[in-house]
Image (tube, rainbow, N blue to C red):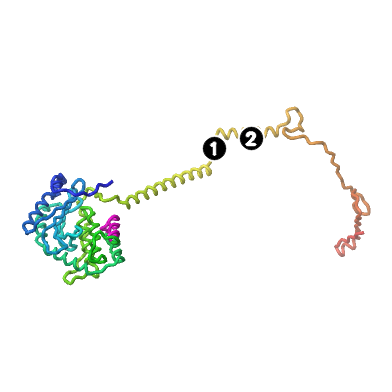
Amino acid sequence: MPRKIKEYGRQDLIDVALPNHASTYTVISHKSIMDLSTKALEDAGFKIVDEKYRATHDGNIASAIYRLNYGDDSELSMMFAWSNSYNKIMRFKCGIGAIHTKNDTSMVCGDMGSWARKHIGTADTETEKTIIEQVSLAKMYYEQLVSDKEKMKEINLDRRKQSQLLGILFADHEILTTEQASLIRQQMSRPTHTYENNESLWAFYNYVTLALQQSHPRTWMEDQRVLHWFITSLPYFQPASRPQVAAPVVEENVNEATVPFVDPRQIDLEDSIAEVLAEEANKTSLENNETEMVQDEESEEEAAPVYCEDRIKERIAEDEAAVAAVCDPDPHGDEDHVDGVDELPDVEVETTTIEDKSTDGGLETPFEDDTDFDFAVMDDDDSEESNDADFDFA
């Protein structure tokens, strides 16, 4: 069973052993990010109200959310977030966002307020500069999120439209697991928190951010960014002050991963099903091959039977003995007797012969018959004229 993501304390992440990779790999430690972020926020006049850390069981992948005391909005508080890894499967990321105080969910800008850096070269020094830059623009990012929230409240979104957006996020953008999609569907039917309008785009946004709280630290920030970009890019979401932006660039190959990533949130059902189907297909293929081999062997036996030399000699001897038994004379001297053949009884057979008798130029037979045949012979002169035989029947 995969191990679940759990919350860590600050010291727990500091105690995680640093990686020992190739010389080209630049280590960005969890402790250094904590120290740099804390100093940059304090220097900009922000106070960290709360810290929350999540990490894998070995601490190699970690994320943090710092709630800040800035903001006059009753629903959103400013936050600073970062994600980091030691096992080469994720770049360092940081950005400004907001926390919804009602349900403790997060918001991260989809077109700005985030930065990612590979762990190579001068990544450690660039990390410090980027954290300072992000903090310096924190107020602008926060105000933009507050404006987006108010715009979402104005857009009505019935259940059918919410379902369509859920399907796009799950099947197209792939930022949701099956468990997260199921959780969102439950929120659509029975929301955990009540909003001003449960059939609004803002309510649906919160349903999704609630589910994204279960995201892995490796994908959490990017999932949040894609969600916010998607919502603010909808045709009916066109704030006058907000420029249209391109979709966030998805990291397809950061060329850092030497260890394959295993998502500890769940067992990959699709891979499990694929493995089962592959095993069944392989088993079926083997059975078919065995059947074909047996059929081929049987066909070869029928087409080319195997002859045994001793068997052939034995059959020839049996045939010669049978012929001799039938054709040889009787050993007792009776040449008329044949073994295996019964003697036939003497039967007197009367034969009838035809005798030539000159009776008026015809033939007289010994058979008694009531029919008399008279043949009249014509003179030579008559036969020469007609060449026809005249038969006179009496």
Choose between 29 and 42: the one closer to the eye. Answer: 42
Determine whether the residue tagged by mark 2 lies in a helix, strand or loop. Answer: helix
In the picture, measured across the screen, residue 188 lies left or right of residue 40, that is right
Choose between 258 and 209: the one closer to the eye. Answer: 209
Amino acid type for the residue under numbered disc 1:
Tyr
Q: Main secondary structure of the magenta part?
A: helix
The image shows residue 193 at horizontal and vertical percentages of: 23, 60
At 75% from the left and 27% from the top, the residue drawn is 332
- Against 164, is 39 above or below? above
The image shows residue 316 at horizontal and vertical percentages of: 61, 34
Neighbour tally class for label 1: few under 14, some 14-19, many 20 plus, Cα within 10 Å: few
- Against 26, is 46 above or below? below
Q: Mark 1 = which residue?
A: 307
Q: Mark 2 = which residue?
A: 319
Determine whether the residue tagged by mark 1 lies in a helix, strand or loop. Answer: loop
- Residue at the far top in the pictured view: 332
Label 1 close to label 2 by CB (< 8 Å): no
The image shows residue 147 at horizontal and vertical percentages of: 16, 67
Boundaries of the magenta span: 174-187
Q: Quadrant of residue 16?
A: top left
Q: Earlier in the sequence, mark 1 or mark 2?
A: 1
